């Protein structure tokens, strides 16, 4: 049982999921090996630099100084751990199909080092059956011959990057496992860092619950954006409508319109769900339509922006303010802002961007806010933005965030 284990854990992947988990576990007294293939990332971590907004440099340095957090590229450290937690990305591949290549590589890499009686936990989000039908057979194919018993569980990550309230301790966890012993071990493990744990009957229930959580959000985000277009076309204030609807004390959950859902979860997890459903000869057309609607919102924003440019030409310059997928993070994955930039550039417009959190993206760097543009598009309400500077530029502004007071020269998206 886990109480007889050494409190050593190897966490595979030191990104937005793995690093906060590592720091929380080290604070709880676990010796943590934070393993990642990115040598530059590991060097930064060893030097006390965190690129993750949920882990400050001070927190990282404290964990390093405690000698309970060891960032490394060395997978042999897995052999010293009693628990191995997989926190690698599971993005979409071609034709919006699940891409488990990073998960595949992680399982193969740990298999040759995992010791007997270890607990392996999958936190990476994936479709139902990933643990049972993908992870376990792959592990068994590559494991050491003297390893006879390994425990397997899944607890899909529930990280909300940039959230100042919800964290590892107060966010409830869902755990499913391959058998009762694995479930009990995983529950004891997470009880060191989490106040509320819900166990479910199978890993498949845990896996699909995560997909449904984010599918619920996507459907409602797509709905409110479609509804906002209708209301705007009929000269109705969508925000006044939402304010009125939100007075109902039950049965209503408010979502606000914007530039669309981005990031590592909301645009991705529903596609995992629809892929899984189709593979099982099922259909969830509502989700397919919601994915389509969300993907087209940047087109709508680009058209709205162009309609505000008085003398549109090939020399038109636009500044997009906010390039990350949401406020408070540096993550640009699946960012609607990037899609908006690409749409405008495809029309021959010169587009720069500014973001106080994101210093560089691809080979581009953040530009200064000034009046040398025909239009400023505020897509993300990033902390640290000087909104008075936007207004002083004397340039037409499209505010997609409902941050600024609508006045002469300042226009709302809807």
Image (spheres, grey):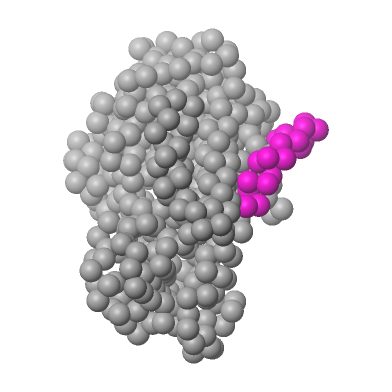
Q: Nearer the viewer, residue 236 or 170?
A: 236
280 on left or right of 43:
right
Q: Nearer the viewer, residue 289 or 102?
A: 289
Vertical arrangement, residue 382 with respect to residue 53, above or below? below
Q: Is residue 54 above or below residue 277?
A: below
Q: Identify which residue is drawn at 57% across, 83% down.
A: 348
Camera-side residue of 411 and 337: 411
Could you tell me if residue 162 is visible in this image? yes
Q: Quadrant of residue 140?
A: top right
* Residue at the image position 58 percent from the left and 41 percent from the top: 219
Range of magenta residues = 275-294
Q: Is residue 43 visible?
A: no
- The chief SS type of the magenta part is helix
Mark count: 0
Left or right of residue 137, residue 232 in this image:
left
Q: Position of residue 56 (x, y in %)?
A: 24, 47
Residue placed farthest to the right in the image? 281
| Residue found at x 28% / y 78% | 393
Q: Tell me what residue is drawn at x 58 percent, y 65 percent.
A: 299
Is residue 286 on the magenta stretch?
yes
Residue 355: quadrant of the picture = bottom left
Quarter containing the N terminus: top left
Q: Is residue 159 magenta?
A: no
Q: Percent from the top left, x then y, of residue 75?
A: 46, 40
Is residue 74 placed above or below 394 in the rendered structure? above
**Residue 228 location (% of width, % of height):** 53, 52
User: Percent position (x, y) of residue 184?
Assistant: 46, 12
């Amino acid at each position: 049982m886990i109480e007889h284990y050494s409190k050593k854990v190897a966490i595979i992947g030191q990104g937005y999921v793995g690093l906060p988990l590592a720091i929380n576990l080290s604070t709880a007294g676990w010796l943590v090996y934070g393993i990642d293939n990115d040598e530059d990332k590991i060097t930064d971590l060893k030097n006390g630099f965190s690129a993750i907004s949920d882990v400050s440099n001070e927190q990282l340095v404290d964990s390093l100084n405690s000698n309970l957090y060891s960032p490394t590229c060395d997978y042999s450290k897995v052999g010293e751990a009693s628990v191995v937690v997989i926190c690698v990305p599971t993005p979409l591949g071609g034709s919006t199909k699940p891409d488990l290549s990073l998960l595949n590589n992680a399982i193969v890499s740990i298999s040759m080092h995992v010791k007997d009686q270890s607990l392996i936990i999958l936190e990476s989000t994936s479709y139902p059956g990933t643990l049972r039908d993908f992870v376990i057979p792959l592990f068994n194919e590559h494991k050491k011959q003297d390893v006879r018993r390994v425990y397997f569980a899944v607890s899909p990550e529930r990280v909300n990057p940039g959230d100042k309230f919800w964290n590892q301790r107060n966010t409830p966890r869902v755990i499913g496992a391959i058998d009762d012993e694995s479930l009990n071990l995983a529950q004891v493990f997470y009880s060191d860092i989490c106040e509320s744990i819900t166990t479910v009957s199978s890993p498949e229930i845990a896996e699909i619950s995560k997909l449904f959580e984010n599918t619920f959000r996507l459907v409602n985000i797509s709905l409110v954006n479609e509804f906002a277009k209708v209301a705007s076309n009929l000269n109705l204030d969508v925000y006044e409508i939402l304010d009125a609807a939100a007075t109902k004390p039950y049965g209503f959950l408010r979502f606000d319109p914007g530039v669309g859902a981005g990031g590592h979860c909301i645009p991705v997890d529903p596609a995992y769900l629809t892929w899984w459903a189709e593979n099982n000869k099922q259909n969830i057309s509502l989700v397919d339509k919601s994915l389509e609607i969300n993907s087209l919102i940047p087109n709508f924003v680009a058209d709205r922006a162009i309609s505000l440019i008085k003398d549109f030409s090939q020399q038109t310059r636009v500044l997009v303010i906010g390039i990350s997928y949401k406020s408070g993070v540096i993550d640009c994955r699946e960012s609607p802002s990037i899609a908006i930039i690409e749409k405008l550039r495809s029309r021959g417009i010169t587009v720069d961007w500014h973001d106080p959190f994101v210093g560089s993206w691809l080979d581009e760097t953040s530009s200064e806010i000034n009046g040398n543009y025909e239009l400023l598009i505020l897509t993300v309400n990033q902390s640290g933005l000087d909104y008075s500077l936007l207004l002083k530029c004397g340039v037409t502004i499209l505010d997609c965030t409902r941050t600024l007071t609508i006045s002469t020269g300042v226009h709302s998206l809807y």
